[in-house]
């Protein structure tokens, strides 16, 4: 009979190997967790944005029909014609409809999402509608859906008088807007061969447009996405800016980030045509 001792424990080498594997695993999880959180947030926003746009479209029809039914108030089409006579192709709905203004109760409560009360949770999403008159009398609508960065975030507010040549531009002064809204920024297209997608941002507005921003051409209503920022004021788009049958303009609409923040506030831009 053998009295030899049976050793069933782990050796030091095996213990160290197991500890090393656990360390690598924990490091991998720690590195993937922030990525997972960000991907989840992006997926949530991609789900919410079209819902906000659908609600905005329905509300627009109600507002416009209500004002069009009034014999004392000008209708939306007349206001857009008036804006075009002053050289303004696109006008924000809150500026075009009488009775609705930036900061008014209707704009504060009806242009945010969700419409239902969320107390004590603050609302985070806001929509803006840029309206342009088409030759057939219908209205081309571009709905910008924005997300507020935080309760204390402040955003730039554009000039709201569409009878002025500087309509949509951001005036000098304090940044005190409560919600992210589209503003107009001047751009210059590159004339160099092979740079049909390159734009230069007007000085002083470099921080308004970043990589990943969505911009709207004020002249044609075409939507572009900024793929790269090659310098402080030079950006590259996802498609050509020049050489269209209907040429692009000298201004774009974009939702700039909050004051002191570089986080992209615009989570979606959706277009539709509505007949009023």
Image: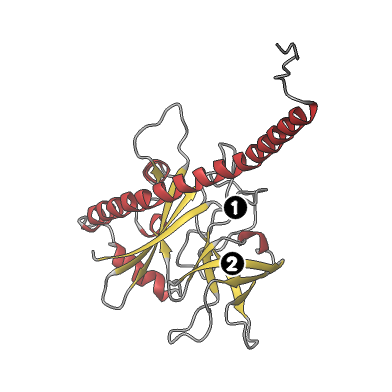
Q: Which residue shows up at 51% across the image and 44% down it?
A: 41
Q: Which residue shows up at 46% across the image and 47% down it?
A: 43
Q: Are the residues tagged 1 and 2 within 8 Å (C-beta)?
A: no
Q: Residues within 10 Å of mark 2 (few under 14, many from 20)?
A: some
Q: Position of residue 262 (x, y in %)?
A: 64, 52
Residue beneath label 2, please?
227
Q: How many marks?
A: 2
36 vs 16: above or below: below
In the drawing, does residue 235 fall left or right of residue 244?
right
Q: Position of residue 148 (x, y in %)?
A: 52, 44
Q: Position of residue 256 (x, y in %)?
A: 58, 56
176 vs 61: above or below: above
In the drawing, does residue 156 fall left or right of residue 25?
left
Q: CA distance from mark 1 to mark 2?
A: 17 Å
Checking the image for residue 257, the label placed there is 1
**What secondary structure is found at the residue carrying circle 1?**
loop
């Amino acid at each position: 009979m053998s009295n030899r001792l049976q050793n069933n424990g782990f050796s030091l080498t095996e213990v160290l190997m197991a500890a090393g594997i656990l360390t690598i695993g924990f490091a991998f999880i720690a590195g993937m967790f922030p990525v997972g959180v960000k991907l989840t947030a992006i997926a949530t926003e991609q789900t919410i944005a079209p819902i906000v746009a659908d609600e905005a479209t329905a509300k627009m029809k109600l507002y416009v029909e209500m004002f069009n039914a009034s014999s004392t108030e000008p209708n939306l089409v007349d206001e857009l014609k008036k804006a075009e006579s002053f050289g303004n192709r696109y006008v924000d709905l809150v500026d075009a409809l009488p009775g609705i203004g930036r900061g008014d109760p209707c704009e504060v409560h009806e242009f945010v999402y969700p419409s239902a009360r969320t107390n004590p949770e603050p609302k985070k999403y806001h929509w803006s509608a840029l309206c342009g008159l088409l030759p057939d009398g219908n209205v081309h609508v571009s709905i910008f859906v924005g997300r507020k960065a935080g309760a204390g975030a402040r955003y730039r507010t554009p000039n709201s008088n569409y009878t002025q040549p500087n309509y949509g531009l951001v005036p000098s002064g304090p940044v005190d807007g409560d919600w992210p809204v589209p503003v107009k920024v001047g751009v210059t297209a590159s004339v160099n061969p092979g740079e049909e997608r390159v734009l230069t941002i007007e000085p002083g507005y470099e921080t308004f447009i970043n990589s990943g921003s969505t911009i709207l051409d004020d002249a044609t209503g075409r939507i572009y996405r900024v793929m790269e920022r090659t310098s402080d004021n030079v950006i590259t788009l996802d498609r050509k800016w020049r050489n269209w049958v209907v040429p692009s303009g000298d201004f774009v609409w974009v939702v700039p980030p909050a004051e002191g923040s570089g986080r992209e506030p615009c989570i979606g831009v959706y277009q539709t045509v509505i007949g009023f």
